[in-house]
Image (tube, rainbow, N blue to C red):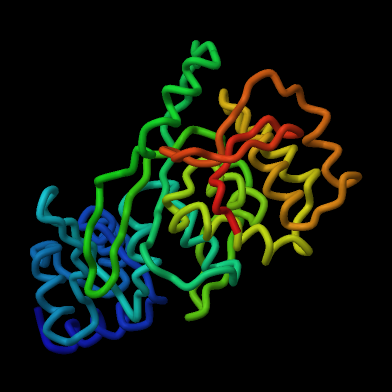
Amino acid sequence: MRLERQTAVIDAFRQLPPQTMTRKALGEYLGTRRAALKVPKSFGVDDLVDLLRENDVLKIAEISSQEYGSKSRYAFGAISPLQLACSFYKGSFLSHGTALYLHGLTPLHTIFVNHEQSPKNSTSRLTQAGLNNAFKNSQRQSTYVFRYGTSTITFLNGKNTGGAGLMEMQAPDGERLTTTSLERTLIDIVVRPQYAGGIRNVVSAFRQAQDRISVAEIARLLAEMKYVYPYHQALGFLLERAGISAEELAPLKLRAIRFKFYLDYEMDQPAYDALWKLFYPSNLP
């Protein structure tokens, strides 16, 4: 391809806002711009990648795992690890500890990126024996973990909620990201406390957030998310401990309490709260 055409292609792609593309998406984009840039049909995706890489317009951003190999995306501009993490699965969003970071409640450690499962019909029947058995063991955690530079990215395949409580937020570096609302985040870290760094971090997050949240919104989201386990008991306990008044807790107190529940997994000699019928670590701050 002639030099002036190469220059036109380079300039056009240099003007793209920061983003990632798959090989397929890059090929489709080239197809839409081929006529305007007067790019010959013989100039394919591989040629384009070589040209753009040679001129520092495109970089290959790769995440890797000893167990699962590597995944990569073509990156234009300054792409943050958070943006990259969300680019591998359609409908991905940042959750748990990463959402706490975006809401200003904790430093960023592991990047948790969630993409929900397809809808399923649950036939689970809750029993006290089943609850006792589930919480006597450690919490199941995703092993689908990758590295990107100094960042750790954990992919979660979460329960289908129909996107309940998702929002767009501007991250500290200025990029726009999809994450969970503060109320949805608090529900998520009660369901999976290890994804927030453990139950002590969960308690800290509730205390820091207590004057920023709506208990009514938590109750609404919890109903929409349709968990089998009675997480309203754990949420009520933590919110009360964080200083939320009994009047504000009414939306959760109105829900039936049929079973004794657990705040955390694998607890040794836990304490018990009779109001919420909840076992919790005896050394809880």
Q: Residue at x 53, y 11 (%)?
A: 125
**Which residue is the extreme one toward the front?**
269
State the image quarter where residue 27 is shown.
Answer: bottom left
- In terms of depth relative to the viewer, which is nearer, 9 or 281? 281
- In terms of depth relative to the viewer, which is nearer, 27 or 160? 160
Above or below, 46 against 215 in this view is: below
- In terms of depth relative to the viewer, which is nearer, 93 or 202? 202
User: Residue 259, position in %: x, y?
Assistant: 64, 20
- Quadrant for the C terminus, please: bottom right
Q: Is residue 24 left or right of residue 120?
A: left
- Quadrant for the N terminus, please: bottom left
Q: Residue at x 51, y 52 (%)?
A: 199
User: Residue 91, position in %: x, y?
Assistant: 44, 47
Q: Residue at x 72, y 44 (%)?
A: 218
Above or below, 135 against 105 in this view is: above
- In terms of depth relative to the viewer, which is nearer, 28 or 74? 74
Q: Residue at x 19, y 71 (%)?
A: 39
User: Residue 219, position in %: x, y?
Assistant: 74, 38
State the image quarter where residue 151 is shown.
Answer: bottom left
**Which residue is the extreme one toward the right?**
247
User: Residue 103, position in %: x, y?
Assistant: 60, 67
